[in-house]
Amino acid sequence: MKRREMILRSLQAGAVIPFLKPFELLAKEFENSLSTAGTGNQLRFPPVFQNGGTMTLASSNVNVWPGQDTQVVSINGSYPGPSVVIQKGSVFSANFVNNYNEPATIHWHGVDVPELMDGHPKDSILPGGNYTYTFPVINRGGTYFYHSHADMLTAEHVFKGFAGFFIVTDPDEEYLGLPAGNFDVPLCIQDRRSANIPQFLYDPVMSDVMHGFLGDLPLINGTPEAFFEVSKTLYRFRLLNGSNARIYKIALSDNSPFHIIATDGGLKDSAAQVNSFFLSPGERTEILVDFSTYNTGQNVFLKSLQFTAPGSGTYVQGTELNLLRFDVTGNQSSGGVVPESLPPINYYDIADIKTTRTFTLTMNMGGGMNIHRINGLTFEMNRIDWETPQNSLEEWKIINASNMLHPMHSHSRQFQVHSRNGNTILPPEDKGWKDTVLVNPFETVRLLVKFTNYKGEYLFHCHNLEHEDDGMMLNFKVADPVGINEDNENTADEYKLDQNYPNPFNPSTNLEFGIPESGFVSLKVYNSLGAEVAVLVNEIKPSGKYSVQFDGTNYPSGIYYYKLESGNYSAVKKMNLVK
């Protein structure tokens, strides 16, 4: 077949040109051929989103199965959604236009963003509306993604196609010699129900609310019965579990070993050789697979191994599935290597834990909805369930008191898994930076987390999307450091705490305050961690106005807080020492 005809047929079947390096040049270097190793559909790849452009949500018809229309909820008419590929340190921007008939938001899963950019359901965009998402990309290089997060509509929107890759590149990783270009391959794994071909019919019953909406047909990048032609060389595969509820036990069909090099938040600190690993909804794991030992003409499957899980009926967890067939067809070299070492990770010290929070996952079998709960609670939009002080290391103890599987996900900052049932020797897919962790039935998992970049309201929830929509989700607020909150000033007119001047300052600044009556007065300075660094006033004073100087000569640059307390009055303001 002529190359032009081949490309045209691929596009007509819904295929899009695969990623190359740099990703935005993928179309220019596309080379492809039809497989001769068997039946199936050539692996498709979504288009790359042009930063600064428009993301339009709408109902679209696409060819998931050749020659058949499937109605999906798409971004820019693509299923899966267009892939965002952006370099660390850049500013991402997209005008989101909701041309769908339901409220919608975009959550940038695993990406550390300001509150109003996070896609919280309280910030949903109504049909016909639009909203500009823009934020600096401060995450490590890695594989992230985006998806719907509308209240009680997340599961249906994602199942019908509203999700896509958000890949952060980092030029500093190039020295590692990892496979790149055609040999760096993103794979979004989802499941659908073969009984409903060619549609993505979403009609959950009570058993689906219990266990999640599961299918028996895997789609890879939206491709059924997918195959991918490989050369006899080393590849990097970025695996994303974009399913609503299905958990995969990833392996090769011949049980060959491969290496895990990255988890949710980017590269691990060392490559780990494994034969299999678990990948739950919302998790990402990057692996290196070496095809040099295979002969041209051979094939091997990426698959999900059988495992024991709760549930019964037609669609159950733990079903053995062939995910993607690799057809060995060439001898081109990627030039990639399995690195002997990867960039170090600074692991938290449990001695620095300031607060331990316990989250107990339960089931309510009293009838009706809201079966799945956290600490006996279900989601309420306007309720803040706890406050987490910024820059304070916390231990989150997740106790699964049910026989359900729960992939727990935190918005905003990535965390570190510390232990499972007290065991600190963890499987390789747990080590490194994470934002989603699978909590097995009757298991206790401890996480360490510190929110350092943004304050505001975020979410903690189960990423089994049926569980989430059933209310297994809580709001938390990242607030100012312990004992410090700029918003807590008493409104009594007689008291006054002025903004320091100058601000920013170096090395000293003036702090002025007023008190209406004689009494004990405390004026203290705290650093950004909430630690007291200076006592400026700590005595009984008569009513009046006062000015005190703070000398920052012996303190490092940074944000500081000064707090005035007198009687029942307290107020806090922020100042910035810049050297």
Image (spheres, rainbow, N blue to C red):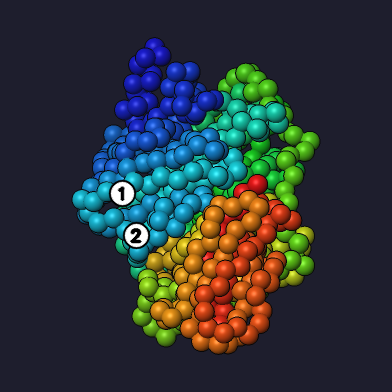
Which numbered disc covers residue 40? none
Q: Which is more toward the observer, 302 or 235?
A: 235
Going by the image, does 556 lie left or right of 57?
Answer: right
Which numbered disc covers residue 123? 2
Q: Is residue 241 visible?
A: no
The answer to whether mark 2 and mark 1 are in CB contact below 8 A is yes
Q: Residue at x 56, y 65 (%)?
A: 511
* Above or below: residue 102 compared with residue 478: above
Q: Residue at x 52, y 72 (%)?
A: 513
Q: Which residue is mark 1?
A: 131
Mark 2: few/some/many CA within 10 Å (<14, 14-19, 20+)? some
Disc 2 to disc 1, C-alpha distance: 10 Å
Residue 460 drawn at (x, y percent):
50, 66
State the SS at label 2: helix
Q: Which quadrant of the view contains residue 394?
A: bottom right
Q: Residue at x 52, y 31 (%)?
A: 228
Q: Which quadrant of the view contains residue 330?
A: top right
Going by the image, does 280 lie left or right of 259?
Answer: left
Residue 559 drawn at (x, y percent):
60, 57
Quarter occupied by the N terminus: top left
State the SS at label 1: strand
* Above or below: residue 521 compared with residue 476: below
Q: Which one is earlier in the sequence, the residue at label 2 or at label 1?
A: 2
Name the amino acid type tagged 1: Tyr
